[in-house]
Image (cartoon, rainbow, N blue to C red):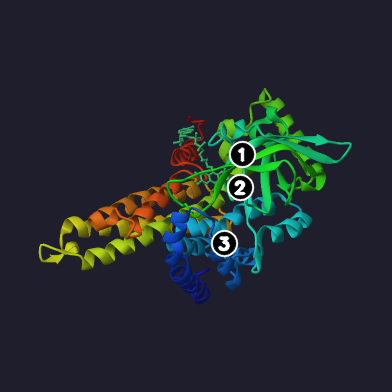
Amino acid sequence: MAEFTMELNDEQREVRDWLHGFAADVIRPAAAEWDEREETPWPVIQEAAKVGIYSLDFYAQQYFDPTGLGIPMAMEELFWGDAGIALSIVGTGLAAVGVLANGTEEQIGTWIPQMYGDATDVKVAAFCSSEPDAGSDVASMRTRAVYDEAKDEWVINGTKTWATNGGIANVHVVVASVDPELGSKGHASFIIPPGTRGLAQGQKFKKHGIRASHTAEVVLDGVRVPGSCLLGGKEKLDERLARARERARAAGGAGASPAEGPGRVKNAAMATFEASRPAVGAMAVGTARAAYEVALEYAMTREQFGRPVIDNQGVAFQLADMRTQIDAARLLVWRASWMAVSGKRFTAAEGSMSKLFASETAKKVTAQAIQILGGNGYTREYPVERMHRDAAIYTIFEGTSEIQRLVIARTLSGMPIR
Ligand SMILES: Cc1cc2nc3c(=O)[nH]c(=O)nc-3n(C[C@H](O)[C@H](O)[C@H](O)COP(=O)(O)OP(=O)(O)OC[C@H]3O[C@@H](n4cnc5c(N)ncnc54)[C@H](O)[C@@H]3O)c2cc1C
């Protein structure tokens, strides 16, 4: 029987220290500048590519760490450096995972290298699912893909929003409805190759935080892509749609998709989300830890009333709570990541739990850090106000905190709670 340990092994420690070095020496010093510029930090992505942090190989290696801790460890360190820059570095991964999860071997081999480019010519990719009227309610997606059999092409029309790297990506992965009657069961994912006509960037958003990460609308106007751009291929899609139609008929209506009923937590997509959510939790842990460290250092050196401010329980206890919550968040993230890699069933939505707790912790801890730094905390002379702005994203993207609570409550009760 395997020995229980909560210690990282030598290899993991080595990778963590290497990533920490990159985050401390390259990412953190660039953070304030790119936050102000509100632009994609291409030179930093290029540096990451040069040392091997910006590549599918690197994330695949972390993903295949048998303990499950490779990805959360990498996320925590990079986001400790800076959330906006780190999202610019890992954002392509969202689209890559979309292809890895649904694509054929040929699609994976063709498109993923084009998502990253190489160290001399780095590229990024975008994953476009959200729409103006379909955020949490993914099933109400309006973007439509219609098959043109004569030309073996798909014609895609619609507007995507809040897409990380949307419009500046070399490759876009777009989720569209191929059968609106089936709700989210009628969705399929498509590759939009570089330079495809009809795809355009809409407005680029000016944001509260993670401003070094590009977020924009993507407009799809009569976009035509070859049949080979449907992820997984037509045969697989037709089989999947036939099964979904059959189940819908058996359940008594086309709209009665499992996403809307108590069986929701059992479907495959939900299992995938449970496995991917801890990665976002780990990003939040990174930001929270960064702000906590700044606050601890400040509280130990800033003197008022003739003594360091940490010499007051009111300040010291806040730091004690901050660190306790960060460590608790990391443990939830690690538990869910270990469950995902060892094929354990998420019987209590442990992935959602980790994302919920870690993201709420990051918001709280970064606000406390501002308080501990007093006036300095409120200025851009110190990084904690940026970290607080950045932290607000974790309770919103990849499923809001309310949606995480909904998933947890449904999983615990088996009831279709609304
Ligand atoms: C910076 C940024 C980057 C993003 N990157 C991407 C990306 O790369 N690709 C992509 O596809 N999307 C991306 N998103 C979109 C993101 O996933 C959505 O914003 C998120 O899913 C929430 O959707 P919404 O904004 O429409 O909020 P809404 O769904 O409109 O929710 C509004 C409020 O109502 C609450 N609410 C909604 N439904 C319920 C319910 N049933 N019960 C209780 N409360 C509820 C929500 O929790 C929230 O507080 C990004 C968003 C941002 C801000």
Q: Nearer the viewer, mark 3 or mark 1?
A: 3
Residue closest to the eye, 322 or 92: 92
Front residue of 307/313: it is: 307
Q: Residue at x 61, y 33 (%)?
A: 139
Q: Under tag 1, what secondary structure?
A: strand
Q: Work out how far the residue at label 2 is from the one at label 1, CA to CA, in angstroms.
A: 9 Å
Q: Position of residue 199 (x, y in %)?
A: 69, 43
Q: Ligand 1 closer than 8 Å to the CB at disc 1?
A: yes
The CA span between labels 3 and 1 is 24 Å
Q: Where does residue 406 sit, x and y in percent of width and height?
A: 47, 37
Q: Which mark is residue 166?
A: 2
Q: Considering only order in the chain, which callout, 1 or 2, is on the residue closer to the N terminus?
A: 1
In the rendered structure, which amino acid carries the disc numbered 3? Trp
Query: In which image quadrant can residue 47 be found?
Result: bottom right
Q: Residues within 10 Å of mark 1 (few under 14, many from 20)?
A: many
First along the sequence among labels 3 and 1? 3
Q: Which residue is mark 3?
A: 42
Q: Which mark is residue 160?
A: 1
Residue 283 is marked as: none
- The reply to whether callout 2 and callout 1 are in contact (CB within 8 Å) is yes
The reply to whether the C-beta atoms of the residues labelled 3 and 2 are less than 8 Å apart is no
User: Around disc 3, counting alpha carbons within 10 Å, would you say few (fewer than 14), some (14 to 19), or many (20 or more)?
Assistant: some
